[in-house]
Amino acid sequence: MRLIQPAKTIALGVAAVLAVLVTGTGAAWASGVAMKTGLATPVMLADKKQTAYLKVGLTGVALEPGMRRAPVNVAVVLDKSGSMTGQKIAEAKRAAILAIDQLAPDDIVSVITYDSTVNVLVPATKLSDRSSLYAAINRIEAGGNTALFAGVSKGADEIRKFAGNDKVNRIILLSDGLANVGPSSPSDLAQLGSSLTREGITVSTIGLGLGYNEDLMTQLSSRGGGSHYFAEKATDLAAMFEREFRRTLSIVAQEVVVRIICVPGVRPVRVLGREAEIAGQQVTAMLDQVYSESEKYVILEVELPAREDGSELHVASVDASYTNMKTKAPDKSSARVLARFTKSAADVDANTDRDAMVAAVEQIATEKSQAAMKLRDEGKVEEARTVLMQNSGYLASNASKFRSDKLSRFQEDNDENAKNLDEASWARQRKTWSTGDVWRVKQ
Amino acid sequence: LKPRLVALFLLIVVLPIGVLAALAFRIARDEREMVEHRLQSVMAGALDDVRGAVARLMAQRFRETGDALRLPSLDPQALRDAGRRNLAIRQVFVLDGKGRLAFPTTAIPLRPSEEQFLERTRGVWEGGGAFLRTGSDRVATATQTLSLPASLQQADSARSGEDSGWYPWYRGTSLHLIFWSREAGGEIVGAELDHVRLLADIIALLPQTDPLKPNPADGAIALIDAGGNVIYQWGGYAVTLPSGQQPRATVWLDAPLHSWRLEYHAPQKLFSAGRQSLFFNLAAGVGGLALALIGLAAYFYRENSRELREATRRVSFVNQVSHELKTPLTNIRMYAELLDREIPDDSEKARSQLEVIVSESQRLSRLIGNILTFSRKERDSLVLRYSVGVIDDVAQSVIANFQPSLGACGVKVDFTASAGGKVRFDADALGQILGNLFSNVEKYAGAGGVLSVTSRQAGETTTIVIADNGPGIPESQQENVFAPFTRLRNELTEGVTGTGIGLSIARDLARLHGGDLRLLPGSPGAAFELTMKTPAASAEGAFE
C-alpha cells in the first residue's frame, strides 16, 4: 500500500503531463491557425489559493509559396489637409502607389482623400487599370481642414461595395493632423473603429509627423482591429505603407474571437492588456486577425482554488472561432487547460512555460508603462519617471530570468521613454511610446 | 451765358445718363435678385432631397431596430445577443411595467459596457424620468412625457398603434437616440443607438465632393448639429464653416434629428458672376450713350461759340464804324453851328436848311450813341458818369433839340417841369433815354398830337412821364416793346425805319441809374414813366 501511493501519484502525474501535452499546451493545428493554450505555471503549489496566468496564443501558419492568399479589399484614406502640403503629400502619394503596387489584379482598392470635405478619388474597383489609379493619386493636392471621421466613414462605404468575409477588408488611414471637422474625440473614433470591426472591416492608421493626435489614431486602429504606425518623417511613409500592406496580405484568419470558459471555482480576474468581456465564468476577447507566422495572444489572470498536492484541475475550456482565409469558411479550435498541484517549488519552476511567462510580463509591464504615461500627461513627470524606473527593473530581472530578447528590447524602449519625459522631446516620444504599447497589447 | 451753358449741359448730358444709369442699376439689381432667388429655391430643393434621404435612413433604422428588439423572451442573454447582432445598437434595455429599469441592472453581473451605459444614461432615468412615468394605463401620454417636440409626435402618431418611438437626448451638443417599443405585457424594450455609427452611416449616405473638378460654383453643403458643429460637409466651395456668413439656404432635418440642419453656402462671386457681365453690358451701353451725348453737346457748344464769336466780331465792327462816324459827325455839327452864326439874320431859307442839317446830324449822333451804348452793354462795360446838374435843364435842352423836327411833324410839346433841384445824375444817359422816347413820338404819334412831358422829384427819386396822344401800343405787345430788336408790326409801323434797340437801351440805362422805365397802363396814347435815382448834390460822398 505504501508503494502504491507514490506509484499512483506518479501515474497520475504522468497522466496529467500527458493530458497537458495532448490538450493543454498541445498545439491544435487547424488549417491556418495554430492554437496554443496553457497556464504560465501549469504546475502549481498545492494547498494554496493563488493566481495564475492563462495564455491563449494563436499563430498563423506560414504561407506556402504559390499558395493563393486571400484577396484584399483595401480603402486607402489619405489626409490632404493644408498641413500635408509639400513633401508630406508628395511622399504620401509615392508611398500609396508603391504599396498598391504590391497588390494583385484580383484585389480591390479604393482611394479616398479628405480635407474639409471628402473625395472618393477612386471608387472601390478591381486593380485592373493601375495607370489611371496612379494618375488619380498623383493629381492630389493638399489644402483645407481635416474631416477625418468623414474620410473613414466614406472609406468604409467604399469597402462595403465589395465586402465579404472571403476578403480582407481593410481601411488604411494616413493623417498628420488633428481631426477638426465632424466627430473628433479619441473615444468617438474608437467607437467608430469597434463598430467597423463588428462589421468585418478593420482600420489601420499611420500617423505622420509630430502634429497628429496619437490617442485618436491608436484608439481608432486598436479598436478597429488594425495596426498603428508612427512615421516621424515623410520619407518613412513608404516603409510604413509597405509594412502595413505586407501585414494585410499575410492575414490567414479574421474575425477571430477567443472564448475562455472557466470551470466553477476558478475565478477569471481580468485580461491583461487587451480589452475583453468577462461575464460570469465566460471571457470573450476579440483578436480580429491572425497574421501568417505571427502570434497573437490573450493573457487571462485567474484565481485558482487551493488544491491538495498531486491533484489536478480542469481550469478552463478554450475555443477560438474565426474565418479561415484559406478555406474562406468559419473555423474553430478548441482546447482544455489543466493544472497540476505539487508541494515542490522546484517542480513549479521546472514546469513554468517560459513563453507564457514572458507574455504575461510583457502585458503587466505595458500596463505599468501606460500608467506612467498617464502620470506624465497629468504633468507628474517625476512620478512617471519613478514608475518607469521600477518597470525597467521588473523587465530587466524577467528578461534575464526567462532569457527573453523581447523583454530586453522592451526594457530599452522603456528606458528611452524615461529619458525623454521633458517637454522638448515629449511630442515625439509620446507617439513612439504609445505606438510601442499598442503593438505590445495587440501584437 | 456760362452758367446757362452749364445748366444746358447738365440737362442734355448728365440728366439722361443719370436716368439711364439708375434704370440700368435697377435692372441689374432685379436680375441679381431673380438669379439669387432662383438659385436659392434650387438649393433648397437639393437640401430637401438630402433631408428626405436622411429621413428614409432614419425610418429604416427605426424599422430595423424594432425588428431586432422583437424577441421571444426578454432574458439577459437574448437581449445581449440582440444588441450584439445589430450594428446600429449600442445597448439594449428593458423597463418593467412600472417604468423601472429591468435590464441592465446591478442585480445581475454586468459587463463593463453595460455599466458604462447605466452611468451614461443616468440622467435619462433620473432627471427626465421620461420612461418612469409610462405606466400601462398612460399609453396615450407616453409620447408627451417623453417631452418630444410636436414634429416628432406627429412622426410618431403614424406608428401610434405600435406604441413605439424615438427619444432624443443630448450629452453636451451630441445627440443620442433611444428607440423604445411597448410590449404587450406593458414592458418597454428599448435600445440606445450607437450615435457614432449613425453619424458614419449618414455620412456614407451623403454625397462626396467631386474629386476631379471641384467647382466652387457648386457651393458647399454642410450638415450641422445642435451645437453648430459641422458634422459633414461637401461641395466644391472650399469654405471653413462656420464662416460667419449667412447660409444661402437652410433646411432642418426631420425628427428625431430635428436639431440638425443642412446649410448651403456659396461664394459671393457665384452671384456676382452673372451680375458682373450684366453690369458690364449695362455700363457699356450707358457709357456709349454718354459719349454720344457729350459729343453732341461738344458739337453744339462749338457751333454756338463760333456764332457767338461771329456776332461779337460783327458788334465790334459796328462799334468801330460807329466810333469812326462819330468824329466826322461832331465836326459836321460843330461847323453847322459855326455856320449858323455866319448866316445873316434875313436869310430864312438858308437858316431853315441849316436847321435840317443840325437836327439830322443830332439824330445820327443819337443813333450812334445807341449803338455804342448797346455794344458797351453787350461787353458789360456800360457805366454811368455822374455829374451835378438839373434834370429839367437837360430835359429842356433835349426838347429844344427835337423842337424843329417835332414841329415839322405837327406835334406840340407840353413840358411841365418840376425837377429843378441840383442832383447827381448822368446827363448823357438821361439825354439818350429822352431822345429815344421822343424819337418814337416823332415816328409814331403823327400830326396834331401832343407830347406831354412831366417831371417831378421826390426825395432821391426823379420821375418823368412822357405821354403822347398817338395810337398807343396794343396791350398784347406791351410786354415786348422793351425787348431788343423788337419792332411793333402793324399798319402804323409800315414804312417807318428803326433799329429796334431804342426802348431796350432806354430801360437798361434807367435801371442802371437805379430806376426803371415802364409803360403806364390805361392811358390813351403811349405813356412811359421814367424813374431815376438822383441823390441831391449835397449828398455826394454818401452816394459814391
Image (cartoon, rainbow, N blue to C red):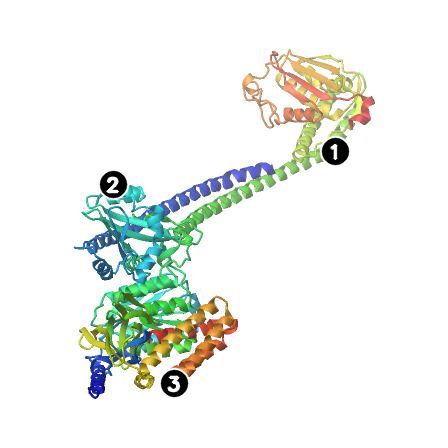
Determine the secondary structure under disc 2. helix
Residue B93, position as x, y percentages in the image: 26, 54
Q: Closer to the camera, A231 or A397? A: A397
Q: Mark 2 and 1 residues: CB-CB less than 8 Å, in contact?
A: no
Q: Residue at x 65, y 34 (%)?
A: B378
Quarter holding the C terminus of chain B is top right
Residue B256 badge: none
Q: CA distance from mark 1 to mark 3?
A: 148 Å
Q: Quadrant of residue B453?
A: top right
> Which residue is tagged 3?
A401
- Subunit under mark 3: A
Q: Closer to the camera, A314 or A413? A: A314
Disc 3 versus disc 2: nearer the observer: 3
Q: CA distance from mark 3 to mark 2?
A: 69 Å
Q: Amino acid at mark 3?
A: Lys
- Residue B273 visible to the viewer: yes
Q: Residue at x 64, y 25 (%)?
A: B502
Q: Residues within 10 Å of mark 2 (few under 14, many from 20)?
A: few
Mark with earlier residue (2, 1): 2
Residue B138 badge: 2
> Which residue is tagged 1?
B327
**Relative to B454, residue A85 above or below:** below
Disc 2 versus disc 1: nearer the observer: 2
Residue B210, position as x, y percentages in the image: 32, 62
Q: Amino acid at mark 1?
A: Thr
